[in-house]
Image: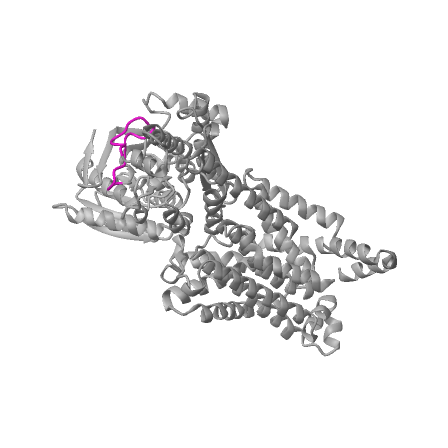
Amino acid sequence: MKKIIIYTVILFMLMYPLLVGFSNYYLTIFFMMSVYVITALGLNLLLGFGGQVSVGQAGFLMVGAYSVAILSSKVGLPFIVTLPLAGIITGIVGLIIGLSAARLKGHFLAVVTLGFGISVPQIILNWQGLTGGYSGMSVAKPTFIFGIHFYYVVVLITLFIIFIIYNLVNSSLGRAFIAIRDSEVAAQSMGINVPLYKLLMFVISSFFTGVAGGLYAYWFSFVSPNDFTLATSFLILAMVVVGGLASIPGAIIGAMVLSLIPHYTDQFVGLTNLIIGVLMVFIILVRPNGLASIKKMSFKNLTFGKKVGNKGVIKDAEIG
Amino acid sequence: MVLLVLAACGGEGNAEESTNNKKSSAYVQGITDTEILVGTTGPQTGPVAEYDKVRKGIQAYFNYVNDNGGVKGRKLKLIAYDDQYQPAKAVQGMQRLIEEEKVFGIIFPVGTSTFSATEELLKESKIPVVGIGTGATKFVDPISPNIFGMQFNYANEAKLMVDYIVNQLGAKKIAIAYQNDDFGIETLEAALSTIKKLDGVKVEKEVSFLSIDQDYSAQAQQLVQAKPDAILMLATPVPAAALRQEMYKLGATDIPFVVSLTGGQDKNQFNLAGKDVWEGVITAMPFASYESSDHADIDKYTEQIKKDFTEEDLGALTQSAWGTAQVFVEGLNRVEGDLTWESYIKALETLENWEGSIFDSITYTSENHYGNTTLRMVEAKNGNLEPIGGPVHYDPSTGKVTYK
């Protein structure tokens, strides 16, 4: 059953451009969704699986986007090189932020990442020579994957990253992350090198976020210091919370829902933020495990309705 | 997923509908027997939500026109998308306006970086874009056939101000303080090139700063020590106020302090700098302010804004949006025969020193898409910006400045 869903989703993604009549607007909606899916997965790895708070993910997106912009426009490197490099550069920045994460917890870590998220646009704004400052810089579009082809490149990369993260959280690495989240002392006593794994979390998360930022720069062929602000960081956090912490489908659903809301509400001034806010409060009050947990329950009820009973509820509780 | 399918289906439906419309009525996109669709993007929420006043100004004028019978029987309908000043959102908004909503034209898209991001898209689509919300030269020179400026061009403004300082204030030694970004450097270069051509006038001192600087005391010291006849300040509002404060502390407010329109035209400067501090500053506005204007139609503007929105929305932003909407509609009125993108652009290019809007005069020709090239010099007095003389006209083709 799971496989059928996955194949349907993939088939849908492949057919999507035909369904929307190759409309750039709808392709862009899908693209932004992909960027947020990758970013939300990255944050979920940190927050949901690893228990490390970050409210500065926009900073990583920005580093990734500007890495691509600078490497492609100023250095002239091709797509195939710049995109992984954007990930690596962002990963290195993540490593530096992660160094503080190894020492800090909870609110303190949140403040550090918050500061990071705010400072990146300021640095870009003032590093005129490299970044073009206030007015942003344009990105040379890779000619061979222009337009519709680029859509499929994005689909491939997104699927690939989902696949990697899925395998990652189900590996010993992922289990170590979860152990650290649940109890650092217990994790340490089991022989897990806690500071090292915390660093790893930040590096992996920022790597993927950097790649998403890089894709963004290519898609819009333009980057500016206004692209990813503090509001973006909170939006990504909201995606993970609304979708479901420590759940891969949750992060994906959260990212999709929150990036689609503006499509329906944009014509009404201020409505978008209102709806996102109400949704956040509603989810936290009614389903603290996020939208993913609703899906899980109804899905189980549908297929194995009689057998689930209490078991399903217990399993849900365990996730949170 | 379901939402996405819905969104996709919605899109398809729209597309079919509009192609049907097109076939049956033979109109171009955005035009029906009863309606003209017009689109805009700009910040409505977020840190610079102030710019939502642009939308309000356009909407107010459209309401005014609709209440008075519309444009040749067609009502104007504005679709505005929030871009939160983010280029990606602006691109999405523009794609949606052009491809999905299929608007006839774009009016007053706000912001330089957001416009940079959408520029290619707009050029390729060939949709008429009237009154871009940026005065950067690169968008209007060299000319793009479908893109029309309106904001007073930054470089032209600097040239005009130099002329004013030299010919009206009689200054020979000029000091320039400029903001070290695209805007500041573009205006600085324009000012320097003008000064170079003038005999006996020289630049005594150049100082620079960043828009986020906190301390302007060093710059103020340097300016005072240079003993200039006048200071030209090419800046955005916050640095303009901060530097003026330092000059005030040094007791150097008697040196004429001329601030570019971007940094000076808002009365909020009195609050930023302090009422006594800002007193005496010379700056400019792209039109006579609604309070001092003798324009016949100015009451219509104040009444309509108060009716549709609130009194607080009166001011430079809604005023220039109102003016831009007037120009947009005048273009529509001037179209002879079928209303198409080509005929509309052609009609716009017949505007020659047109005085029917809130702006003093508007000119579009096939070589000049600057739009507004007339300013009003004003002086800060008793919490008001009081006009000094009449309109000042800059001719972009000859570089000549005339005082009326």
Magenta range is B350-368
Whether residue A77 appears in magenta in the rendering, the answer is no
Question: Is B70 located above or below residue A124 in the figure?
Answer: above
Estimate the x, y position of residue B42 in percent, counting from the top left.
Answer: 46, 42
Question: Is A61 located above or below residue B343 in the figure?
Answer: below
Estimate the x, y position of residue B344 in percent, counting from the top left.
Answer: 34, 35
Q: Residue at x 31, y 46 (%)?
A: B144
Estimate the x, y position of residue A28 in percent, counting from the top left.
Answer: 51, 53
Q: Viewed as shown, does residue A31 lie left or right of A70?
A: right
Q: Is residue A107 visible?
A: no
Whether residue B356 appears in magenta in the rendering, the answer is yes
Q: Residue furthest left?
A: B199
Estimate the x, y position of residue A274 in percent, counting from the top left.
Answer: 62, 42
Q: Provide the major secondary structure of the magenta segment.
A: loop
Residue nearest the observer in this picture, B172 or A217: A217
Question: Is B259 located above or below residue A25 in the figure?
Answer: above
Q: Residue furthest front?
A: B24
Identify the image quadrant of residue B367. Answer: top left
Residue nearest the observer in this picture, B196 or B81: B81
